[in-house]
Image (cartoon, rainbow, N blue to C red):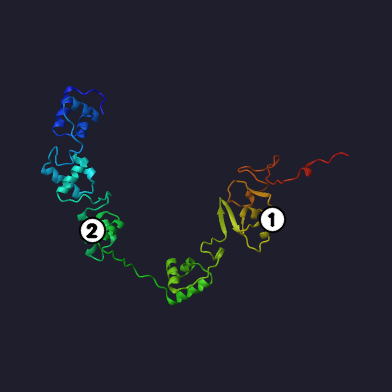
Amino acid sequence: MRYTAVTEQESLDISNKYKAGGTLRDIRKQFHVSNSTIRKILKNHGVPERSPYFYHGTHQVKKLDAATVDAIVERFNTTTLTINKIAQEFGLRSDRIKSVLASNGIDTTVKRVRSNTALLPQQELEAVALYESSDAVTLSTVAQQFNIAIPTVRAILERHGRQVRELVGRPKKILASDDAAKVQYMLGDGCSQQTIADTLGTSQNTISRFIKLSGIKRKHENRSRHKHGMWRGGRIKVHGYVHVLLPQDHKFFHQMVGSTGYVLEHRLVMAEQLGRPLSRYETVHHINGIRDDNRPENLQLRQGNHGTGSVHVCRACGSYDVVAASIAELSEPSES
C-alpha cells in the first residue's frame, strides 16, 4: 500500500473505474491504495458503494465474451488446477468461475485432485484402455507410460470398476526328494535355514517355503553359539575391545568369565602370560592406545583404573617392567 496522498487525477480515475464496473480489489491492485481510501474517494465523489452480494445475483458488472468463457472451460477441463487458481489467472472471483462452468454444464461440486501426478478424465480412460489391451501390460507399464505411481494406477482402475490382474511370476523352486531328506536331517541336527541353504546351493526363502509346505514342526529350542545362524566363531568386538568365548575346560574359566561365557582378550592374554588369573582389581593397559592390539608386548598390567594415553615406566632406565608394591615393603626398617 502507498503512504503518499492520492492526486486529484488519480481520485477521478478511481471513481470512473468503479463506475465502469471495477471492483475494490481491481482498483486496489492498480492504484496501490487501501479499501478505506477507495471508499473515502467514492464518498467524496458521491458514488454509492455496491453491495458485496452484487456479483452473486443476476446483476453482473461486465459480461464475459465468448472467447474468455471458452478459455475458462478449456483451462478447467485440460488441467488439474483448482477453481481458485483459475480465478487468479483470469482476474475474476471464484464464484464467477463456478457460474461460468455451471452454465456450460460442468459439475463443480466434485472435488478435484490437486496432486501433480493426477490424470485428467480422458487420460484415466486411456490408462484403463491400455491396461485392458493385453495381459502382458502390467501396472508398472501403465505407470511408466503416464509418469505416475503404481498405487495411482491401481486407484484409477478401482475407480472405473476394473479388476487388477494377479501377477504370474516364475514358478517356485521345488526341492528334490533327496534334498528334502537332507533338509529334514539337518534341521534335526540343529542347523539353521541359512546353513542348509548354503549346503544345498539354494536360498533361505526356498528352505523356509519347503518347511512350511511340508508341515515340519521344529522344536523351539534356544539355538545359541555354534547352533545360531549368526555365529561368528566366538569372537566379537564391543566398543573397540575384543571379547572371546572361553571354553568351559579352560583353567581360567571360572575365575575370569562372566555370565555370557566371554572374556576380554587382553585380560586373557595377560593371565596366560603370568600363569595365573587376574584379580578384579587388576587392569591391563594398551601401551599404544589401540584397543584391539592384544600382543603381549603391547600390554601392561596395572592396579586399579588407568587413564587413556598414560604409561607407567621406570624413571631410571625407562623400562615398562614395573610392579605395584605396598608401602610397608618399601619403608626402611626402624632403628631400635
Could you tell me the amino acid type at mark 2?
Ala
Q: Amino acid at mark 1?
A: Pro
From the top left corner, tell me how far across and down residue 195 is, in percent. 49, 67
Q: Is residue 156 left or right of residue 326?
A: left
Which residue is labeled 1 in the image?
277
Secondary structure of the residue carrying numbered label 2: helix
Judging from the image, what secondary structure is the residue with disc 1 in?
Answer: loop
Q: 317 or 271: nearer the eye? A: 271
**Comes first in the chain, label 1 or label 2:** 2
Let me know if residue 34 appears in the view.
no
Q: In this picture, is 279 found above or below 37?
A: below
User: In the drawing, what numbered circle is on residue 127?
Assistant: 2
Quadrant where the C terminus is found in the figure: top right
Q: Position of residue 196 (x, y in %)?
A: 48, 69
Instruction: Out of 332 and 239, give the one closest to the viewer.
Output: 239
Label total for image: 2
